[in-house]
Image (cartoon, helix red, strand yellow):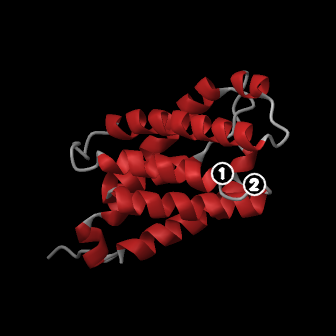
């Protein structure tokens, strides 16, 4: 059931990423909600789920947005794996956790992307990536990650999965 919920969240996020999230840029920076979803999945479900969410989300983005196939998938996979490694060592109720891991994931995504674009030399300008707004994007991702994390935490909680949207009647 959790895999189905995560899959639906990834698909809904991808649809919103292609449509709505493209238009809510702040200071020219668009949110990377996909990274927030991968971070939340990796924290809440571990490295295997983080890897799967990263690969699926990255491949969807690579094929839809015309990027070289595999770069986003690999960068998201590395971020999901690295965060998932620590998922059992952290207190999952603390909302500072997704903020810290989201900033790390943003840095990992940029580093892996720069490395692969440099290796394949596909219209790559190192200067453009150095000038890129990584700090505003990191802050934006950290803010968004709190909401995504809280929402996924509720969706993946055992009582929610068992009971769903049942309304409890008081007697």
Question: Closest to the observer: 95 or 38?
Answer: 38
Question: Quick one: label 2, few (<14), some, or many (20+) residues within 10 Å?
Answer: some
Could you tell me if residue 19 is visible in this image?
no
Q: Is residue 138 left or right of residue 117?
A: left
Determine the residue positioned at 59% across, 40% down.
Answer: 112
Q: Is residue 47 left or right of residue 18?
A: left
SS class of the residue under badge 1?
helix
| CB under 8 Å between discs 1 and 2 | yes
The quarter in which the C terminus is drawn is: bottom left
Q: Is residue 106 left or right of residue 59?
A: left
Question: Closest to the observer: 68 or 151?
Answer: 68
Determine the residue positioned at 51% across, 41% down.
Answer: 144
The quarter in which the N terminus is drawn is: bottom left
Could you tell me if residue 77 is visible in this image?
yes
Identify the residue under disc 2. Answer: 68
Determine the residue positioned at 32% across, 55% down.
Answer: 44
Q: Position of residue 33 (x, y in %)?
A: 57, 48
Q: Looking at the rendered structure, which numbered label has been put on residue 58?
A: none
Identify the residue under disc 1. Answer: 71
Residue with the most extreme front position: 119
Question: Closest to the observer: 59 or 154?
Answer: 59
Q: Position of residue 71 (x, y in %)?
A: 65, 51
């Amino acid at each position: 059931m959790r895999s189905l919920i995560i899959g639906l969240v990834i698909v809904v996020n991808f649809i919103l990423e292609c449509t709505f999230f493209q238009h809510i840029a702040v200071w020219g920076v668009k949110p990377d909600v996909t990274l927030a979803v991968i971070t939340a999945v990796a924290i809440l479900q571990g490295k295997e789920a983080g890897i799967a969410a990263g690969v699926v989300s990255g491949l969807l983005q690579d094929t839809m947005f015309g990027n070289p196939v595999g770069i986003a998938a690999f960068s998201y996979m590395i971020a999901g794996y690295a965060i998932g490694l620590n998922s059992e060592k952290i207190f999952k109720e603390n909302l500072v956790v997704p903020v810290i891991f989201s900033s790390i994931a943003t840095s990992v995504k940029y580093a892996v992307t720069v490395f692969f674009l440099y290796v394949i030399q596909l219209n790559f300008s190192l200067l453009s990536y150095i000038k890129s707004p990584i700090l505003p994007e990191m802050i934006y991702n950290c803010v968004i990650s709190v909401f995504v994390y809280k929402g996924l935490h509720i969706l993946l909680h055992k009582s929610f999965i068992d009971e769903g949207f049942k309304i409890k009647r008081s007697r």
